[in-house]
Amino acid sequence: MKKVHGACPHDCPDTCAWVVTVNDEGEAIEFHGDPDHPFTKGALCSKLKRYPQRVYSQERVLYPLKRSGPKGSGEFVRISWDQAIEEVSSKFKETIEKSGPLAVLPYNFAGTIGMLQRYAGEQFFSRLGATEILGDICGATAYDAISSVIGPMDSMQVEDLQYSKFIILWGTNTATTNVHLWGGAIATARRSGATIVVVDPIKTNTAAHADWHIQVKPGTDAALALAMMHVIIRDGLYDKEFVDMHCLGFNGLSERVKEYPPEKAEEITGISATEIEKFAIAYATTSPSAIRTVVGMERYSNGHTAVRAVACLPGLVGAYREKGGGLSSFMLSMFFEALDYSVMLPPEEHLPRSRSLHLAELGRALTDPDMDPPVECLMVYNSNPVVTAPNQNLVIEGLKRDDLFAVVHEQFITDTALYADIVLPATTQFEHLELMPSWGTGYLALNKPAIEPLGEAVPNTELFRRLSRAMGFTETYLHLSDEERIRLMMATGHKYICGITYETLAENGWASLNLGDFQPLANGQFTTPSGKCEFYSQDYADAGQDPLPIYEPLDPFEYGVDYETPLHLVSAKNAHFLNSEYVNLRHRGTVKHQPEVEMNPQDAASRDIVDGDMVRLYNRFGEVRVRVHVSNMTKEGVVYLPFNWWPETTANGQSANALTPDGVSRRDIGSNAFDAHIQIRKAG
């Protein structure tokens, strides 16, 4: 038997380190977390514990398949890899000759988030000249907004939250989606007397176990943050020395927040003026204080203004001075510095691309009659857009087009794969080599393949090497092996990665970046254009947007009919799934194996709805039929339906994204899916 080090491939900030035990027959017989990893400490989340079940599932796609029935029927026949590659490459060539390369569209995101598998197709499609897919549907809005205040940098290590005395978890369900942080640094801080505050429209698992839940109305976070700053400046609770030395735009901010007294914010947010005052004073007078925010606030049309307003708070109170104080968010910039991302990205000669489309707008892209040229070939990998993309029905309408040639590289027949002309078998993390930075910690991991690929499954990287050969592309960078690419990415000589080699990672599985005592903002060394914490953003001004923090109401929502009392729909993640992964694998935590909508008792009573009723959620985009759970998880006027259930699990074959809009924020990035409003009635 042998033990093989690896790391979780999922879109999660923790990036769990694991160990797989393999017997002499090459079968993975034991799977557990690596107890030596300083952050994940051998613990795996409830989702990841089921990973071997995923690998060895009888439902795995293990051979290339070709559609033999109508699109959506799930009828396929097995074909050879040679035939599959020939059909895909021939269709690409035929389409390019007839309509040009822009008629080809890749669609991929973070289904597998490692350096190799996530970025595997970027160079191929750039060389092809295909339409570019803009992958900023998640994370980009928050990163952009935070960068406009403190610069594109990491401001604190998550482990340092253990030193905090006042921790605000703003728009993040940490206990469910960031379990090692919750059970590690936050639990340590709490044992030392820290107060844990959750700001969230939903009474999540985290909010239920926090010391204080600020249950804000969806999309009004900026108003709450501005009112807090109003109180802090009014009462002289800000750090004048830090602001004078290290902040830009304080006078403008002072005038702006006068427009947001707690009484006005109460009308907007639903939080009483008294509670806002108490919250602001507690934050400003408890040190060290930290705000932990990830992506929960960003999925609104005004998401960028919300994150930007919240990101101004730590600079105002000088929270960065002390270990355990400041803003805890992404930990990506250090990896951007340490690793050579260009190894996986298109070379300069193929940039910029001639046409770009946004991930959130797939349905529009596939159905727009004015698209010139129209999308004729679609290739999906690392994604299941029928479930994860907004405006689900429009996406399906596009996928049903008889003149669309769709290829899906997948581990299972997902709701997206049902509409494919060709389905290609993809490996799991047990079966391929991968380099794993973490977007939530300062640890780098190497995932070694523990077992041989089952059936004829191949990694994304190998798929695009095969397609490159079939297309006649001879550029060396398209044909590098996975190990060659990893070695090149690590060959930067950067101080963060000094002493960390391919060999040391292969031996130990993971390594900590060389960060030392990481407090980059203690002395005000911001990486903004001014070198200061920018309450006033010239970048926003140049883009025609308000350069100061501001609350902007959500975009008007076109409800449709029967909307005398519309409800705001929040469609966040489910505890038992990772985006759309694991939904098809039955689990004790989802014994009913169907989603439920959470509804406030007052909203239910006014519609003559009781707990357990089958109900219709509908708006102009679609309709979802599920059972209702009447509870106080939401405030009156707000309902919650997890977005990641596959449509097959609902009574009418539509899921949460059948109800979400497919626009972007006012910064033209991210998604406005959380703007959704619906009506609920008893199902007939």
Image: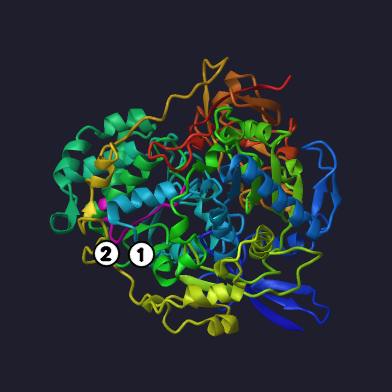
Q: Which residue is mark 2?
A: 521
Circle 1: is it few (<14), some (14-19), or many (20+) Cα within 10 Å?
many
Q: Residue at x 26, y 64 (%)?
A: 521
Q: Which residue is mark 1?
A: 156
Q: Residue at x 56, y 48 (%)?
A: 130
Mark 2 and mark 1 lie on one chain; the one further toward the N terminus is: 1
Whether 41 is drawn above or below 457: the answer is below
Q: How is the image coloured?
A: rainbow
Whether tag 2 and tag 1 are in contact, CB under 8 A, the answer is yes
Residue flagged by tag 1: what amino acid is it? Met
Task: Measure how far apart labels 2 and 1 are at the Cα level.
Answer: 8 Å
Q: Position of residue 643 (x, y in %)?
A: 61, 41
Q: Position of residue 329 (x, y in %)?
A: 40, 57
* In this picture, residue 236 sits left or right of residue 78: left
Q: Which residues are magenta?
A: 283-295
Q: Position of residue 631 (x, y in %)?
A: 59, 35
What label sits on residue 647 in the rendered view? none
* In this picture, residue 342 sits left or right of residue 266: right
Front one among 114 and 596: 114
Q: Position of residue 74 (x, y in %)?
A: 81, 42
Q: Secondary structure at mark 2?
A: loop
Q: Is 443 covered by the magenta stretch?
A: no
Say if residue 585 shows up in the picture.
no
Front one among 428 and 464: 464
Q: Secondary structure at mark 1?
A: loop
Whether 647 is drawn above or below 212: the answer is above
**Quarter of the rendering occupied by the N terminus:** bottom right
Q: Is 293 covered by the magenta stretch?
A: yes
Q: Residue at x 74, y 65 (%)?
A: 52
Q: Residue at x 25, y 66 (%)?
A: 522
Circle 2: is it few (<14), some (14-19), or many (20+) Cα within 10 Å?
many
Whether 315 is drawn above or below 95: the answer is below
